[in-house]
Amino acid sequence: QVQLVESGGGLVQPGGSLRLSCAASGNIFGTYAMGWYRQAPGRQRELVAAISSGGLTRYTDSVKGRFTISRDNARNTVYLQMNSLKPEDTAVYYCNRLRTYYSITPALDWGQGTQVTVSS
């Protein structure tokens, strides 16, 4: 069974940066699109960034220009570089495989996520 393990979250001041990592057990990366989601308190989980198997990327409008998704297939790891963080970025962040690059639907069970808190 594939497991997803997110890490790299923490407390950061507004304007700061964090780099999240998602490591997957098993060989699920090579031909699959991957995505980063987040869920803020009282809100639905949303897809914030996606990357295709070939490296195409897309982002939700609220993070464009600030977040960068990347992947290392050799390490079965996907990253989310988050710059210019805002308090509204506070959420638990999760990664998941996408059914297709243009999908928002996750294909696997969720991992535990990693908490990102942006506050002064």
Image (spheres, helix red, strand yellow):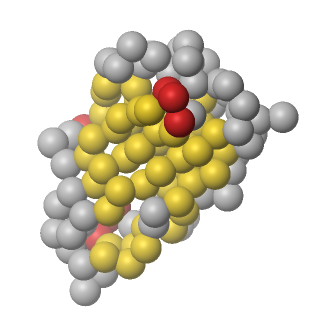
Which residue is painted at 84% across and 34% down in the image?
A: 1
- Residue at coordinates 51% horizontally, 67% vertically from top-left? 115
- The quarter of the picture where residue 28 lies is top right
> Which quadrant of the rendered structure holds the C terminus?
bottom left
- Residue 5: percent from the left, percent from the top? 63, 51
Residue at position x 53%, y 60% in the image: 7
Q: Is residue 56 above or below residue 71?
A: above
Question: Is there any visible trace of residue 2 in the rendered image?
Answer: yes
Residue 13 appears in which quarter of the rendering?
A: bottom left
Q: Nearer the viewer, residue 76 or 104?
A: 76
- Spot occupied by residue 37 in the image (x, y as percentages of width and height): 49, 44
Query: How many marks overall?
Result: 0
Q: Residue furthest right?
A: 1
Considering only vertical position in the picture, is 35 above or below 3? above
> Where residue 39 appears, x then y in whole percent?
52, 56
Residue visible at 73% across and 42% down in the picture:
3
2 left or right, relative to 57? right
- Would residue 45 be visible to someone looking at this image? no
- Residue 34 position (above or below residue 83): above
Residue that sits furthest to the front in the current view: 74
